Amino acid sequence: MDATAIALSARLAGVTLLVLLPLAVLLGRWLAVTRTRFKPWIEGLLALPLVLPPTVVGYYLLVAMGNQSALGRLFEALVGHALAFSFGGLVFASVLVNIPFAVQPVQRAFESIAPDLREAAQCCGLTRWQALWRIELPLAWPGLLSAAVLTFAHTLGEFGVVLMVGGNIPGETQTVAISIYDRTQSFDHASAGAMAALLLVISLVTMAVSYGLVERLMRRRRSA
């Protein structure tokens, strides 16, 4: 077991979740209620990481974060080191790659809320922010839970984009998925198998718990 790579993957998943979930709530809620004619194009853009090969996504992110890009030069001027091939670069890439896994469940949850509830909240004098916190978020909680679980689990197992953007620096950018690849290449099948089994168990448990909690919440809502 590569404990360092496992800890780094868990840290990356946690930071990605903390950064992305609030953004997913705002973006998912806006997509659920907007009537702009550009909505299909925006949804398609956000869903691109689901259909593009990870190497394609990783290539464009690497170009965007390189030393020749404005973002890369700004980050290096502020922090003192390059954005690419660093943990900060992994976080940036992970947030972008996981957007569809976070936004889509949240959007569907907000779309399931009856428009009459939002109108009733306005009639009661609640602002949009107050209605969001007091009414919509409690109703959309199953979607938020699904988004959190999917984002965390997908980040743990991400390989292609992480390798393209972060390389393979032990203790800095070598996640558990890359460590499994390294062990397989060096014919250390025992270590690779153990870490692969760990990822399998974590993914299965998190998904099962997520589905179970969502089902329980939906039952409570129907019986209320």
Image (tube, rainbow, N blue to C red):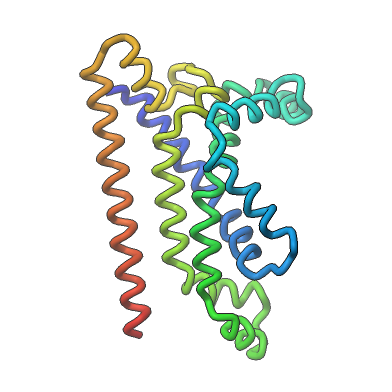
Q: In this rendering, is residue 193 above or below 129? A: above
**Residue located at (24% from left, 24% from top):** 193
- Residue 137 point in image, percent of width and height: 51, 70
- Residue 197 point in image, percent of width and height: 24, 32
Locate residue 171 relative to residue 211 in the image: left or right.
right
Q: Quadrant of residue 208?
A: bottom left
- Residue 36 point in image, percent of width and height: 74, 65
In this view, the residue farthest toward the left is 190
Count of marks overlaid on the render: 0
**Residue located at (62% from left, 25% from top):** 59
Locate residue 203 relative to residue 66 in the image: left or right.
left
In this view, the residue farthest toward the top is 186
**Residue located at (69% from left, 68% from top):** 34
Q: In this rendering, is residue 94 above or below 64? A: below
Locate residue 91 relative to residue 187 in the image: left or right.
right
- Residue 47 point in image, percent of width and height: 58, 47
**Residue located at (28% from left, 46% from top):** 204
Q: In this rendering, is residue 115 above or below 197? A: below
Quadrant position of the N terminus in the picture: top left
